[in-house]
Image (cartoon, helix red, strand yellow):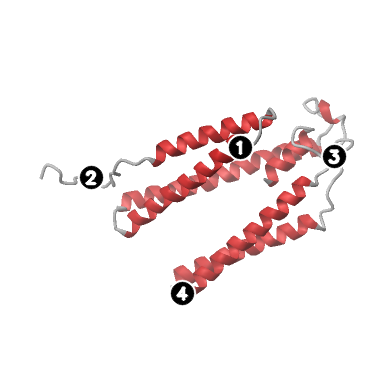
Amino acid sequence: MAHAKNHDYHILPPSIWPFTGAVSAFVMLAGAIFWMHDMGPWGFLIGLVGVLYTMFAWWSDVVKESHSGDHTPVVVIGLRYGFILFIISEVMFFAAWFWSFFKHALYPMGPQSPAIDGTWPPAGVELFDPWHLPLMNTLILLLSGCAATWAHHALVHENNRKDVQTGLLLAVGLGVIFTFLQGYEYSHAGFGFAGNIYGANFFMATG
Protein backbone atom coordinates (compact mmCIF):
# COMPACT_ATOMS: atom_id res chain seq x y z
CA MET A 1 0.00 0.00 0.00
CA ALA A 2 2.96 2.31 0.50
CA HIS A 3 3.49 2.44 -3.25
CA ALA A 4 -0.19 2.59 -4.25
CA LYS A 5 -1.01 5.06 -7.00
CA ASN A 6 -3.45 7.72 -5.77
CA HIS A 7 -3.18 10.24 -8.62
CA ASP A 8 -3.96 10.47 -12.34
CA TYR A 9 -0.43 11.07 -13.60
CA HIS A 10 2.14 8.73 -15.11
CA ILE A 11 5.38 8.99 -13.13
CA LEU A 12 8.32 8.43 -15.46
CA PRO A 13 11.39 6.40 -14.49
CA PRO A 14 14.79 8.15 -14.55
CA SER A 15 15.68 9.05 -18.14
CA ILE A 16 18.86 10.29 -19.78
CA TRP A 17 17.05 11.96 -22.69
CA PRO A 18 16.47 15.39 -21.09
CA PHE A 19 20.20 15.60 -20.34
CA THR A 20 21.32 14.45 -23.80
CA GLY A 21 18.78 16.79 -25.41
CA ALA A 22 20.03 19.79 -23.44
CA VAL A 23 23.71 19.01 -24.13
CA SER A 24 23.06 18.36 -27.82
CA ALA A 25 21.07 21.59 -28.19
CA PHE A 26 23.88 23.55 -26.49
CA VAL A 27 26.51 21.99 -28.76
CA MET A 28 24.35 22.66 -31.83
CA LEU A 29 23.77 26.33 -30.97
CA ALA A 30 27.39 26.91 -29.96
CA GLY A 31 28.48 25.18 -33.15
CA ALA A 32 26.17 27.45 -35.17
CA ILE A 33 27.82 30.50 -33.61
CA PHE A 34 31.29 29.14 -34.35
CA TRP A 35 30.17 28.36 -37.91
CA MET A 36 29.07 31.98 -38.34
CA HIS A 37 32.60 33.01 -37.34
CA ASP A 38 34.20 30.78 -40.00
CA MET A 39 35.22 28.00 -37.61
CA GLY A 40 33.61 25.19 -39.57
CA PRO A 41 30.22 23.45 -39.34
CA TRP A 42 31.31 20.34 -37.41
CA GLY A 43 30.15 21.47 -33.98
CA PHE A 44 26.74 22.36 -35.37
CA LEU A 45 26.44 19.04 -37.24
CA ILE A 46 27.47 16.99 -34.20
CA GLY A 47 24.91 18.80 -32.06
CA LEU A 48 22.24 18.37 -34.73
CA VAL A 49 22.86 14.61 -34.88
CA GLY A 50 22.59 14.47 -31.08
CA VAL A 51 19.31 16.39 -31.10
CA LEU A 52 17.82 14.17 -33.82
CA TYR A 53 18.92 11.00 -32.02
CA THR A 54 17.46 12.25 -28.73
CA MET A 55 14.16 13.10 -30.42
CA PHE A 56 13.94 9.66 -32.03
CA ALA A 57 14.82 7.77 -28.83
CA TRP A 58 12.66 9.89 -26.54
CA TRP A 59 9.61 9.73 -28.78
CA SER A 60 10.11 5.97 -29.13
CA ASP A 61 9.87 5.70 -25.35
CA VAL A 62 6.67 7.77 -25.38
CA VAL A 63 5.14 5.47 -28.02
CA LYS A 64 6.11 2.39 -25.99
CA GLU A 65 4.54 3.90 -22.86
CA SER A 66 1.35 4.58 -24.83
CA HIS A 67 1.12 1.00 -26.13
CA SER A 68 1.75 -0.41 -22.65
CA GLY A 69 -1.19 1.58 -21.23
CA ASP A 70 0.86 3.93 -19.05
CA HIS A 71 -0.79 7.08 -20.41
CA THR A 72 -3.76 8.00 -18.23
CA PRO A 73 -6.59 10.23 -19.55
CA VAL A 74 -4.94 13.22 -17.89
CA VAL A 75 -1.64 12.46 -19.64
CA VAL A 76 -3.41 12.05 -22.99
CA ILE A 77 -5.11 15.44 -22.55
CA GLY A 78 -1.75 16.98 -21.69
CA LEU A 79 -0.16 15.53 -24.84
CA ARG A 80 -3.07 16.81 -26.93
CA TYR A 81 -2.84 20.32 -25.44
CA GLY A 82 0.92 20.29 -25.91
CA PHE A 83 0.55 19.52 -29.61
CA ILE A 84 -2.11 22.21 -30.01
CA LEU A 85 0.20 24.75 -28.36
CA PHE A 86 3.01 23.64 -30.67
CA ILE A 87 0.80 24.30 -33.71
CA ILE A 88 -0.18 27.71 -32.30
CA SER A 89 3.49 28.60 -31.74
CA GLU A 90 4.26 27.69 -35.36
CA VAL A 91 1.37 29.85 -36.58
CA MET A 92 2.60 32.81 -34.51
CA PHE A 93 6.17 32.28 -35.74
CA PHE A 94 5.14 32.53 -39.38
CA ALA A 95 2.69 35.34 -38.63
CA ALA A 96 5.59 37.39 -37.26
CA TRP A 97 7.71 36.91 -40.37
CA PHE A 98 4.86 37.56 -42.80
CA TRP A 99 3.97 40.64 -40.75
CA SER A 100 7.54 41.85 -41.18
CA PHE A 101 7.46 41.10 -44.90
CA PHE A 102 4.22 42.95 -45.61
CA LYS A 103 5.18 45.83 -43.32
CA HIS A 104 8.29 46.58 -45.38
CA ALA A 105 6.72 45.64 -48.73
CA LEU A 106 3.64 47.84 -48.32
CA TYR A 107 5.40 50.74 -46.61
CA PRO A 108 9.05 50.81 -47.73
CA MET A 109 9.25 54.57 -47.10
CA GLY A 110 8.70 54.11 -43.35
CA PRO A 111 11.15 55.55 -40.82
CA GLN A 112 11.97 52.01 -39.65
CA SER A 113 13.11 50.97 -43.14
CA PRO A 114 16.06 53.25 -43.97
CA ALA A 115 18.25 50.41 -45.21
CA ILE A 116 16.08 49.62 -48.25
CA ASP A 117 16.06 53.20 -49.62
CA GLY A 118 12.30 53.35 -50.00
CA THR A 119 12.08 50.59 -52.61
CA TRP A 120 10.74 47.04 -52.47
CA PRO A 121 12.36 44.70 -53.19
CA PRO A 122 15.53 46.52 -52.15
CA ALA A 123 17.75 47.68 -54.99
CA GLY A 124 20.11 45.00 -56.27
CA VAL A 125 18.00 42.02 -55.15
CA GLU A 126 17.53 39.47 -57.94
CA LEU A 127 14.21 37.68 -57.40
CA PHE A 128 13.24 34.11 -58.23
CA ASP A 129 10.74 33.43 -60.98
CA PRO A 130 7.71 32.30 -58.93
CA TRP A 131 6.40 30.10 -61.77
CA HIS A 132 9.40 27.78 -61.93
CA LEU A 133 11.11 26.15 -58.93
CA PRO A 134 9.03 27.92 -56.23
CA LEU A 135 5.80 26.70 -57.86
CA MET A 136 7.18 23.15 -58.14
CA ASN A 137 8.21 23.18 -54.50
CA THR A 138 4.79 24.43 -53.44
CA LEU A 139 3.05 21.63 -55.34
CA ILE A 140 5.39 19.02 -53.82
CA LEU A 141 4.69 20.38 -50.34
CA LEU A 142 0.93 20.26 -50.93
CA LEU A 143 1.16 16.69 -52.27
CA SER A 144 3.14 15.68 -49.20
CA GLY A 145 0.38 17.08 -47.00
CA CYS A 146 -2.23 15.20 -49.03
CA ALA A 147 -0.29 11.95 -48.59
CA ALA A 148 -0.08 12.49 -44.82
CA THR A 149 -3.83 13.21 -44.71
CA TRP A 150 -4.50 10.02 -46.68
CA ALA A 151 -2.42 8.03 -44.19
CA HIS A 152 -4.29 9.60 -41.26
CA HIS A 153 -7.67 8.81 -42.84
CA ALA A 154 -6.61 5.22 -43.52
CA LEU A 155 -5.56 4.82 -39.88
CA VAL A 156 -8.53 6.47 -38.18
CA HIS A 157 -11.44 5.51 -40.44
CA GLU A 158 -10.33 2.33 -42.21
CA ASN A 159 -7.62 0.80 -39.99
CA ASN A 160 -5.74 -0.05 -43.19
CA ARG A 161 -2.10 -0.39 -42.19
CA LYS A 162 -0.91 -0.88 -45.76
CA ASP A 163 -2.38 2.45 -46.87
CA VAL A 164 -0.98 4.09 -43.73
CA GLN A 165 2.53 2.89 -44.55
CA THR A 166 2.19 3.84 -48.22
CA GLY A 167 0.89 7.30 -47.37
CA LEU A 168 3.60 7.96 -44.80
CA LEU A 169 6.38 6.74 -47.10
CA LEU A 170 5.04 8.93 -49.89
CA ALA A 171 4.81 11.93 -47.56
CA VAL A 172 8.36 11.42 -46.28
CA GLY A 173 9.72 10.90 -49.80
CA LEU A 174 8.07 14.08 -51.06
CA GLY A 175 9.35 15.91 -47.99
CA VAL A 176 12.91 14.81 -48.76
CA ILE A 177 12.56 15.94 -52.38
CA PHE A 178 11.17 19.27 -51.19
CA THR A 179 14.10 19.73 -48.81
CA PHE A 180 16.68 19.07 -51.53
CA LEU A 181 14.95 21.44 -53.96
CA GLN A 182 14.73 24.08 -51.24
CA GLY A 183 18.45 23.71 -50.58
CA TYR A 184 19.13 24.06 -54.30
CA GLU A 185 17.00 27.20 -54.39
CA TYR A 186 18.81 28.68 -51.39
CA SER A 187 22.23 27.92 -52.86
CA HIS A 188 21.33 29.78 -56.06
CA ALA A 189 19.69 32.77 -54.40
CA GLY A 190 21.04 36.13 -55.49
CA PHE A 191 20.83 37.49 -51.94
CA GLY A 192 21.94 36.40 -48.49
CA PHE A 193 20.40 36.14 -45.05
CA ALA A 194 22.33 39.11 -43.65
CA GLY A 195 22.20 41.31 -46.76
CA ASN A 196 18.93 43.13 -46.09
CA ILE A 197 15.46 42.74 -44.62
CA TYR A 198 14.21 41.00 -47.78
CA GLY A 199 16.78 38.22 -47.47
CA ALA A 200 16.14 37.78 -43.74
CA ASN A 201 12.38 37.56 -44.26
CA PHE A 202 12.73 35.20 -47.22
CA PHE A 203 14.98 32.67 -45.51
CA MET A 204 13.14 32.72 -42.18
CA ALA A 205 9.63 32.51 -43.67
CA THR A 206 10.47 29.80 -46.22
CA GLY A 207 12.96 27.85 -44.09
Q: Position of residue 11 (x, y in %)?
A: 28, 44
Residue drawn where x is 81% and y is 39% of the image: 191
Mark identifier at residue 7:
2
At label 2, the amino acid type is His
Task: Of the two numbered discs 2 and 4 on the same chain, state the one appearing first in sequence.
Answer: 2
* Apparent side of residue 132 relative to residue 92 in the rendered image (left or right): right
At label 1, the amino acid type is Trp
Residue found at the very far left of the displayed protein: 1
The Cα atoms of the two marked residues, 3 and 2, are separated by 58 Å
Q: How many residues crowd around disc 4 within 10 Å: few (fewer than 14), some, or many (20 or more)?
A: some
Label 4 belongs to which residue?
A: 160
At label 3, the amino acid type is Pro
The one of 48 and 61 positioned closer to us in this rendering = 48
Label 1 belongs to which residue?
A: 42
Label 3 belongs to which residue?
A: 121
Q: How many residues crowd around disc 1 within 10 Å: few (fewer than 14), some, or many (20 or more)?
A: some
The Cα atoms of the two marked residues, 2 and 4, are separated by 36 Å
Res. 191 in view: yes
